[in-house]
Image (cartoon, helix red, strand yellow):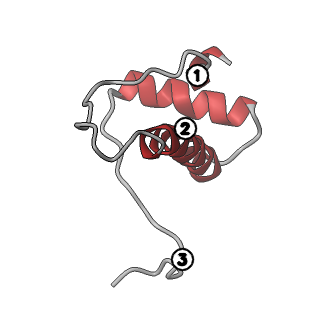
Amino acid sequence: MSSLPHDQHMARVSIAEERWLEFRALAIRKKRSIAAYLGHLVEKEIGRDGRVGQRRATRQDSQEPVYETEVDETWIPPWEE
């Protein structure tokens, strides 16, 4: 049983140790906890995906769904901010 409050979630991250250390250093430079910074990235991704979903919803229902990768050209990786 988890000791986290029911409205909080935990995840494992699969990334190379060197990249994880870079991420931790970035979070520290931004004066954020790792948990808060990861939460911020999740929120940004949900917002980006929501915009994609809104565009898809505006297509006519008779159209076949288009499966493609949509790229947000304005997205800046956190390690380049």
Determine whether label 1 and label 2 are within 8 Å by CB. yes
Give the residue displayed 55% in from the left and 21% down from the top: 77
User: Which amino acid is tagged 3?
Assistant: Asp
Q: Secondary structure at mark 3?
A: loop
Left or right relative to 46: residue 33: right
Give the residue displayed 29% in from the left and 25% down from the top: 68
Q: Nearer the viewer, mark 1 or mark 3?
A: 1
The residue pinned by badge 3 equals: 7
Residue 63, picture quadrant: top left
Label 1, label 2: how far apart the Cα atoms are: 9 Å
Depth check: give the residue in front, 22 or 36: 36
- Label 1 Cα neighbours within 10 Å, binned few <14 / some 14-19 / many ≥20: few
Left or right relative to 81: residue 39: left
Q: Nearer the viewer, mark 2 or mark 3?
A: 2
List x then y, in percent, for residue 45: 52, 40
Q: Earlier in the sequence, mark 1 or mark 3?
A: 3
User: Which amino acid is tagged 2?
Assistant: Arg
Picture layout, residue 71 above or below residue 11: above
Considering the image in quadrants, where does the C terminus appear? top right
Mark sitting on residue 75: 1
Depth check: give the residue in front, 35 or 50: 50
Q: Secondary structure at mark 2?
A: helix
Mark sitting on residue 36: none
The residue pinned by badge 2 equals: 48
List x then y, in percent, for residue 27: 65, 35
